[in-house]
Structure formats: C-alpha cells, structure tokens
C-alpha cells in the first residue's frame, strides 16, 4: 500500500519519521503498529548543511571584490542579493539571516546562510588588461595591502 508521509522541514539525513497506526497488525488482535521511514537527504549541488545553517562558497570576479557591488547567491528559495563592500577580502564570510533551513516548528525562524567569498582571478590577460592591472598595482602600493606589507616587514626583520 502507499501512504503519504509528512517529512518535517529541516530533517537531517538518517533521521526517522513515520505514520502512526498504519504498520502491521498487532499481536493477538492488537492495534496496528507504526510505519517507520528512514529519510535520506540528497546533497544540494551548491549549498552545504551545518546543522540548520547553510553554507555556500561564492566565486566572485576580482573586480567585484575590489570595487564592491552586488552578488547574486543561491538560496533554498532561488537566490538573494548580497552587497559586497569595496575591498572585500578572499575567504570573508557574510551572514544572510533567515536564509537557512526552516525550524522544526511553525514558529521557529529559519536558520542562516553563510556565504564565503572565493575570488576568481583571470586565467589569461591580454596586453591591455595586463597593463591596466600593473598600473593599478603601481598606484595602490603597500598602503592598500596592509597584511602583505606587514608580512614583508616581518620577513625583512627576521632576515637580519
């Protein structure tokens, strides 16, 4: 026979849910048992679970992290816009409240979605693009790369 089984929101892989009273008949004419269903949750192609929170790594072109702007990120409901400030660093993690898995109860608020920034560097540059990046590098100098500048100073001090 077929039965409709309610799967609670946010259920985890390997959890059991079921339907009361539709299993085998009880011994000696007792009431029917329960149907137990082992739930297997298929992985999402982009989102990863962390409890009820979700995590995603977002590939972002280097000009967007340098200049700032909006990034479209995947959610369970489709997508959401994330505003990146100018100078966003690789591996920065942004939190989108309420974009994670729903809670087990109707009144539970959804968990959060965490977006980790993964900067994409162009794999090839034409001469004009290369010249433009070299010009930006000369203009910015060490003042715009404080972590690298601190590392370089530490290396020079250690070499003495």
Image (cartoon, rainbow, N blue to C red):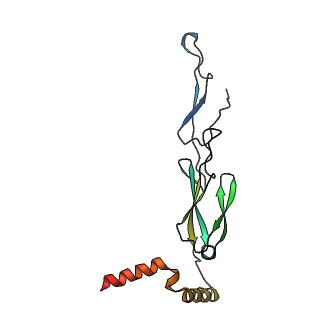
Q: Quadrant of residue 11?
A: top right
- Count of all numbered marks drawn on residues in the image: 0
Query: Which residue is situated farthest in the left direction here?
Result: 160
* Nearest to the observer: residue 145 or residue 76: 145
Left or right: 147, with 2 as reference point:
left
> Residue 67: x and y, percent?
63, 76
* Nearest to the observer: residue 142 or residue 127: 142
Which residue does the image show at 61% across and 51% down from the upper left? 100
* Nearest to the observer: residue 142 or residue 33: 142
Tell me: residue 138, above or below residue 103: below
Query: Which residue is situated farthest in the top direction here?
Result: 28
Tell me: residue 84, above or below residue 48: below
* Nearest to the observer: residue 63 or residue 34: 63
Tell me: residue 28, above or below residue 20: above
Q: Quadrant of the C terminus?
A: bottom left
Left or right: 138, with 4 as reference point:
left
> Residue 64: x and y, percent?
63, 73
> Residue 130: x and y, percent?
59, 87
Which residue does the image show at 56% across and 67% down from the upper left? 118
Q: Quadrant of the N terminus?
A: top right
Q: Quadrant of residue 26?
A: top right
> Residue 107: x and y, percent?
64, 40
Which residue does the image show at 50% across and 80% down from the upper left? 145
Q: Quadrant of residue 126?
A: bottom right
């Amino acid at each position: 026979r077929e039965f409709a089984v309610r799967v609670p929101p946010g259920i985890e892989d390997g959890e059991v849910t079921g339907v009361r009273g539709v299993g085998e008949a009880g011994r000696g004419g007792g009431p029917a048992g329960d149907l137990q269903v082992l739930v297997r949750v298929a992985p999402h192609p982009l989102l990863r679970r962390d409890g009820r929170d979700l995590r995603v790594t977002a590939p972002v072109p280097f000009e967007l992290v340098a200049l700032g702007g909006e990034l479209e990120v995947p959610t369970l409901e489709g997508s959401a816009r994330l505003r990146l400030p100018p100078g966003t660093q690789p591996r920065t993690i942004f939190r989108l409240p309420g974009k994670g898995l729903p809670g087990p109860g109707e009144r539970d608020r959804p968990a959060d979605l965490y977006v980790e920034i993964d900067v994409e560097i162009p794999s090839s540059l034409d001469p004009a693009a290369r010249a433009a990046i070299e010009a930006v590098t000369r203009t910015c100098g060490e003042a715009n790369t404080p972590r690298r500048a601190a590392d370089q100073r530490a290396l020079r001090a250690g070499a003495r």
